[in-house]
Amino acid sequence: MSFGSVKLVHNDGTMHHLGIDETMVAGKVILTPDPQQIPFYAAFLDDAKKVGEYREYVTYTGTYKGVPMSVMSCGFGCMPMAIAVEELNHLGVKEIIKIAACPAIQPETKPGSLVAASGAVRSEGATREYIDISYPAVTDMGLLSRLLKAGVPDSALFRSHDCLSLDTPWAFGGKERIAYWEKLGVDIVDGETSSMLVIAAILDVHAASVALVSENYSTGEKLAVTDEDLEKMFRICADALCDAAE
């Protein structure tokens, strides 16, 4: 396997970080950073069962429209995401979509919008330990196509980095940083997408990322994110995963 990735397990056979084994997870997984949101998303699966809760990784597995599917928290940041992708690959997972509420920085992107990543700027440090910065963070095109077909209206460039608070209007120099990336065409700011896309591509895992725009740093517009907003995002992504189910 690329980069000599070793399958590290506990004495009971569960993965060293995720705390689950092959029998506990489906081949299609929806990831989100916050473990406290996992029970909410798991409620949209049929016969969902909590199969793991270890470190920041909480996992439920069930079915969606008859297709086996899991939802799992990946933790905040590119390093826990890197761990999640590597260990899910060891467990045979081949399709993952990350969902989260994120800020936008292009003035025309309205809060409440759903945006899929076409790719991501690698402004974090985790993926540089895997491969040099010339390697792109690009979404799996087949999965992106299925997301657009399922109801995500647009795709855009994301930027993932390790210090999200610095790219806010309230941080010292934050407005200048936002303006710089806005001019370069970046739209969505997050902490995990580039790590997921790079490592998934290296390991031949199909990966995509979808953001529910919670606010726009360029215009100051904000959205009070509702359960209905989150449910819509989840169901569109679950439908996209089901689209190519055998």
Image: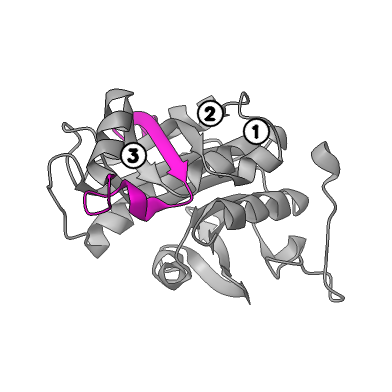
Residue placed at 27% from the left, 24% from the top? 183
How far is mark 1 from mark 3, CA to CA?
Answer: 21 Å
Where the N terminus falls, by quadrant?
A: top right
Would you place residue 139 above or below residue 80 in this image? above
Tell which of 196 and 245 is nearer to you.
196
Judge from the rendering whether residue 27 lies leftward or rightward of residue 178; answer left or right: right
Quadrant for residue 207, please give it.
top right
**Residue 75 rendering spot, x and y as whole percentages:** 52, 62
Q: Residue at point 27% right, 53% down?
A: 171
Q: Mark 2 or mark 1, which has the lower sequence index? A: 2
The amino acid beneath tag 2 is: Val
Task: Identify the amino acid type marked 3.
Answer: Ile
Instruction: Tell me if label 2 and label 1 are in contact, CB under 8 Å.
Output: yes
Mark 3 neighbour class, 10 Å CA radius: few under 14, some 14 to 19, many 20 or more: many
Tag shown at residue 188: 3
Q: Is residue 157 above or below residue 81?
A: above
Residue range of the region highlighted in magenta in the rendering: 148-173
Q: Is residue 50 above or below residue 207?
A: below
The answer for how far apart the CA atoms under marks 2 and 3 are is 14 Å
Q: Name the residue under label 1.
A: 201
Q: What element carries label 2?
A: strand
Q: What residue type is labelled 1?
A: Ala
Q: In this view, does 43 lie to the left or right of 3?
A: left
Residue at image coords 32%, 57%:
231
- Give the mark count: 3
Q: Is residue 166 magenta?
A: yes
Badges 2 and 3: C-beta atoms under 8 Å apart? no
